[in-house]
Amino acid sequence: MLTDINTTMKKTRLDFFNLFLLLLAVGITILYLASKVKNREYEKVFWSGKITVSASKQNLEHDSAIKVIEAKYYNTFDKSKRMLHSDSRVLLNSKSNDSIYFKSEHGLLPDSLHLKYFSIEDRKFYELNTNIPYNKIKKAAKASYGRLSIDVEIKSKGNVILSVNSKNLIPEKTSVFQAQETTGNLSELLFVTRQKTRYNDYDGITNVKDFADLMGNKYNWVFKTELEPGDQISSAYAYSFLNEKIYDIEEDQILGKLSIPERFYIYWTNGNKYDTVYYFNPIEIFSTFRKLNHIDGEEPILLTFKLYKDKYAECVLSKNGISIPVRNVHPKIP
């Protein structure tokens, strides 16, 4: 009988111990779930975003261009920030359909937006600090069943449109904001950070107006080549300082003003194939265009490239008998 009592007591202690372990496990689970709720873990989703620029309806024939200085999404609950991807470009124009991308990560959706940029079209700095519709974005995230993109579209005169997009959703405009004019400085425009190193891509530019004019001014100019005997041009095209393709010899060119070229790619043949890339110094090419544009006369500025197979190419800009050579900052022999 004593043995039965001892056995019963051991079983009772074991039952209590198992009950204690069960209650402990339940308590830990409750605390874990409570912490998840407290930290709003269940609201976290995988999301990203991008910035684009578009021309106004009243000015569709002209491209709009901006330089993004700073952009970030922010969540005030956990103070998380979503910055631009380090490899994103900072210059955008409406004709190239380029985008600047925010980092793609898992986290809480944003409830506010900070944006500062320079409008080349308006020649003004703009800044926007605003709350954005969290609940509306959250609802869209639930309906998307996948990655959500919270996108910013910048128009002229400080107009900013916020929209949410995914493969499962029809793009929906959620809010329209008005960025305010603000102050800025030249260094915000000149310097670009690549791989944690700051670079000045606009050597010689010393004021905001010249930067805007370099990017935004357009001139009547014509491309021409002088070749060695037997050589023949096979292809030639140019990009502006906004990285927009502005000239292609293989396409029908519409007469009109073009942006200042930042670089020319030229290919020619003579049995063998040759090529050169002509990179212009920003202040040199800008100053040359400005000087020649002040010369009276309706004739266009002529960009003449003298191409050689065994030495560096040369470029001369001319108008009405005035010629100015401009150098290639990265020359190479074909």
Image (tube, rainbow, N blue to C red):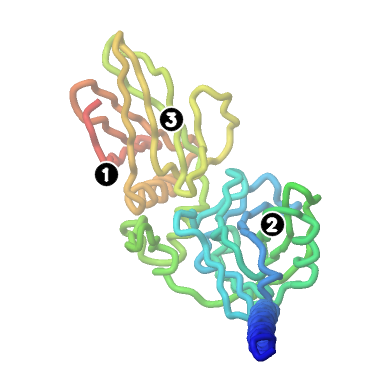
Q: Circle 1 is placed at which residue position?
A: 329
Which is closer to the viewer, label 3 or label 2? 2
Q: Circle 3 is placed at which residue position?
A: 223
Residue at (52, 62) in percent of width and height: 84
Q: Circle 2 is placed at which residue position?
A: 148
In primary-sequence order, the first of circles 3 and 1 is 3
**Which quadrant holds the C terminus?**
top left
Q: Is residue 131 left or right of residue 102?
A: right
SS at badge 1: loop
Residue at (50, 29) in percent of width and height: 248
Rendered view: 205 above or below 135: above
Q: Which of the numbered marks, if any, corresponds to residue 66?
A: none
Q: Amino acid at mark 3?
A: Phe
Which is closer to the viewer, label 3 or label 1? 1
- Where is residue 313, by image quadrant? top left
Residue at (45, 59) in percent of width and height: 86
Which is closer to the viewer, label 2 or label 1? 2
Labels 2 and 1 touching (C-beta < 8 A): no
